[in-house]
Structures are given as C-alpha cells and as structure tokens.
Image (tube, rainbow, N blue to C red):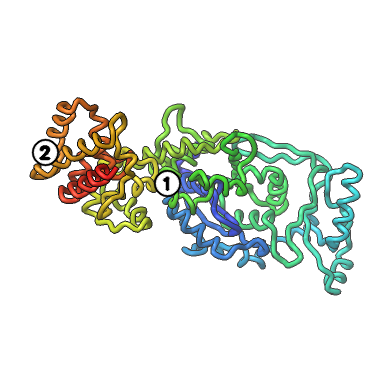
Amino acid sequence: MVSSSQPARVRFAPSPTGHLHLGGARTALYDYLLARQTGGQFILRIEDSDRRRFVPGAEEEIYASLRWLGIQWDEGPDVGGPYGPYRQSERKEIYQKYANELIDSGQAFTCFCTPERLEKVRNEQQKRKEPPHYDGTCRNLSANEVSERIAAGEQHVIRFKTPKEGTTTVTDLLRGDITVENRTLDDYILVRSDGLALYHLAAAVDDHLMNITHVIRGSEWLPTFPLHGLIHRALGWQEPEWVHLSVFLKPSGKGKMSKRESAELIKDGHSIFVKDLEGLGYLPEAVVNWIALMGWSYDDHTEIFTLPDLVEKFSLDKLNPSPAAINFTKFDHFNGLHIRALPLNELVRRMKPYFVEKGFQVDDATLLKIAPIIQERLQGMDDAPELAGFFFKPDVNPDVAELAIKDLTPAESADLAKKILAILESLPDVKLETAEPPMRKLVEQSGLKAGQVFGLMRIAITAQRVSPPLFESMEIIGKEKVVARMRRAVELLSAL
C-alpha cells in the first residue's frame, strides 16, 4: 500500500474524441483517490494531438462529467498549474526537442517511407504470414542524406529505433514483470509527418516533465508497454509506477465492452457514458461506488462506499487485473441504496429537476412531504415523477377497466365507490388517523378484502396501480382533490 508519506502525482489523460465512458471514469476515480489519500496532486491532461479524431465539445463534456462525479483536479487546462500547458496540441515544440534528442543519441530515426510503400510492404508480409511490421528501410540513413531529403521537402516521420536483440522487461504493479523479445517489437512512429507527436512520445515526455509518480491506465496499453519503458530509458528518465487496469466485459461476460453497444443499452435504461447517467436517474454517488468495485475490493463483504470512504480505504495493492463484467443489476441496487441514504432536503433537491423535465409545476414544500413516502420505493431518480406525478395534477384520468374491482360487477363496484365517497365527504379531513379507521370499518362491514376497497381508492385517487402509501398520499393531496377524484370514479363506474 502506498503510504501517506509519499504524495502521489497522478494524471488522467483522456482524448477529446467522444463521450467519457465508464472505463475512463474509473481510471480518473482511482487517480483521484490515490492523490487525495496520499496528499498528492491529481492532474487532468488532454491528449488531443490526433486532430483528425477531435470532437468539438468533448473536452468540456469531460470536465462536466468528472465534476458531476465529484472528481476535481488540482492542475489542468481550465485551472492552470505550474507544469502547463496541459493540452498536448499546445506542446508540439516540447516533444520535438526530445524527439531530436533521441535522434542525436541514435535511438530514433527519420523515416521517409510513403504510406503507399508501407502498405505494399505490409501486404507482402501478410502473404508470407508474418506479423505486419516496419522493415527498417530508413533505420540507417546517414545524417547528410536525412538533411538533404528534409531540405528537399520530403515528407517524413520520426520512428523509435527499437533494439532488435535481447529482451525488454517492464513491470506492472498488478501483473509483475513482463518480458518481451525485442525482435517482436516494431519501430513505432513517435512524431507524425504533421510534426505532432503520437501518444508514445508525448505521454512519456509529459509524465516526466510533470513529475508523474504513477501511471494508471487501461490494459489496452499493455501491447505497447515495453515501448514506453524503452522511451523512458532511452531518455535517461526514471519510470513511473505502471498500473494497467482490468478490462470491462459486456454484461454477459462474453467479450470486451465497447462504445458500439451503447445504443442497445440505452433501450434498457442503461449507458456506458457518464453524460447519460444523470438523465437515466442515477446518482453520482452510486456511479462512483459501482465503478470503484469493478477492479478493486476493500474486503470480501463491504460494498457500500461514499467518496470520502474510498479516499480513506482505497489502495493499489487491492486492485484486481482480472476482467470485470459490467453488472447493471448491481448498479441499480447501489443506486437504490444511495437514494435511501440521502437526507430528505437533499432528495428533494435532486428529484425536483426530474419533475420539472416532465412538465410538472412543483414546489419544495410539497416535495418535502412526498419525499419520505417515496424514498424507499425509488430505484432511480427518474422513477420519482412516474411514481408521484399524480400529486401535482389538477385531476387524474383513471382507467375505467381498472376501477372495476375483480370479482365484482360494474354495478357493485359503483356501489362500493359511492360508499367510499360518502365516508370521505363526511370526514373533517383526510389525514391518515382520520381517514383510515372508517375505511377499515367499511372493509369489515362489506365483507370484501382490504385489497379490493383500497385498490379501488388507489386507482380513483392516483390513477395508478402502484403508488406511495394510500392514506399518507391522500393527506398530502388534500380533502378537496381526493373527494373530487372519488366523485369522478363514481361517475365513470356508474356509466358502465
């Protein structure tokens, strides 16, 4: 476990190429937890060097998604810091300096091979059933030839001169030592022909210059992990602690979760994109709790964590490299638990926008009365208007077929409704203690089941088969509206 005497400097470095997904959010969360726990710093860095994939607005969405989750950074493009700029696109000259250093030390080279030539080489390698790789054409060009060809305006990239003999060993905190034969490694491109550095060089330079102590990232970087170790060593830099997190699997457990599945998930009220989760009724506390446990555990029984709990209890040595299946059932369970843990005032604040979005005119005083009787029933915040919208309607339109009580004729149902209406009209108010006793008495006198009598009342007063507790709801609605709704039910049943 990392001790608090060693402040960690960690970075989350997303590309603004689309929506922030759960995998990225989990990486950011683990970074944040390690920084806060050790008294270190959490840096947000935007890796936008690939301008072809840049999506306008994506950077701002990353900020909004992280802040919604409660994850705040100490340094970044929008807050500044001593190691800026924090966007790769603004650091081109810095990367070029280190690319030139690698060339000067013989550990990188200028490559003039055209895309057409490289494609032809790849096709020939595939015919020979060889893995596609750079064939080394430009590895040993003289400095004079390179200078002349650059001066002549030839397009070129800079490649890393990967050792071709021996082995390279890199160490991942979760997986231990990983050793590869150098002959299996490619001469990867470090700087493109447009002068912009690729991730391999840019991330290494930024991590070094920003004093990053731990690189926590997805396991998709494992194939090029040896290259990243070699780049640090070629520049004479100490490597950070490398941590490659587990892969997210589809809910079925078969195959890696990908952004392509998102359209299907939305149909079921789920999403892998953080921006969608609030609209789907999820609390940020539940998201944080859920993703924290996809790849980490505190012990074999504790499941509910707040962000402060996680800051206190998180440790790198309890991360698990095994793939984690995305379990939306567990997510819904966590969401319900965190909703029930909200203080009532906070529940009101959180659920109010969901009512407003559905067109209800709501007031905090009424919401505060409703909150305690629906809190236990909410699985998602978006359930609130569906469950309790009837409180804010001037009147409701019950389904006549549902008003007709099972095992009773329409005339018998109408007669029961009239008796209920007469009792309600005779009461001074419809508070729980006033209205429930005479209705219980009616159940006994009628010989009917409580479910039949109260079922008719529920449909008449709420127009819903499922609602918060009936008598508590009636008290909030008020006698005038309750009587009017019951009278309407009598009319509907009498017309059958």
Q: Amino acid at mark 1?
A: Tyr
Front residue of this view, candidates 77 and 15: 15
Q: Tell me where residue 127 sits by quadrant.
A: top right
**Is 3 positioned to the left or the right of 444 in the image?**
right
Above or below residue 28? Residue 404 is: above
Earlier in the chain: of badge 2 and badge 1, it is 1
Question: Which quadrant is home to the C terminus?
Answer: top left
- Residue at (11% x, 38% y) in the render: 434
What's the mark number on residue 491?
none
Asked if the residues shown at circle 2 and circle 1 are in contact, with their CB atoms under 8 angstroms apart, the answer is: no
Q: Secondary structure at mark 1?
A: loop
Q: Tell me where residue 48 sits by quadrant.
A: bottom right
Query: Hey, which residue is sitting farthest bottom in the picture?
Result: 152
- Would you say residue 371 is visible in this rendering? no
Q: Residues within 10 Å of mark 2 (few under 14, many from 20)?
A: some
- Residue at (41% x, 38% y) in the render: 334
Q: Residues within 10 Å of mark 1 (few under 14, many from 20)?
A: many
Residue beneath label 2, please? 434
In three-dimensional space, the C-alpha distance between marks 2 and 1, rounded to whole angstroms, equals 38 Å
What's the mark number on residue 282?
1
Horizontal and vertical percent position of residue 338: 36, 41
Horizontal and vertical percent position of residue 62: 51, 57
Q: Secondary structure at mark 2?
A: helix
Above or below residue 4? Residue 209 is: below
- Residue at (55% x, 61% y) in the render: 58
Front residue of this view, candidates 460 and 375: 460
Q: Amino acid at mark 2?
A: Thr
Horizontal and vertical percent position of residue 455: 27, 35
Q: Nearer the viewer, mark 2 or mark 1?
A: 2
**Is 348 positioned to the left or the right of 218 in the image?**
left
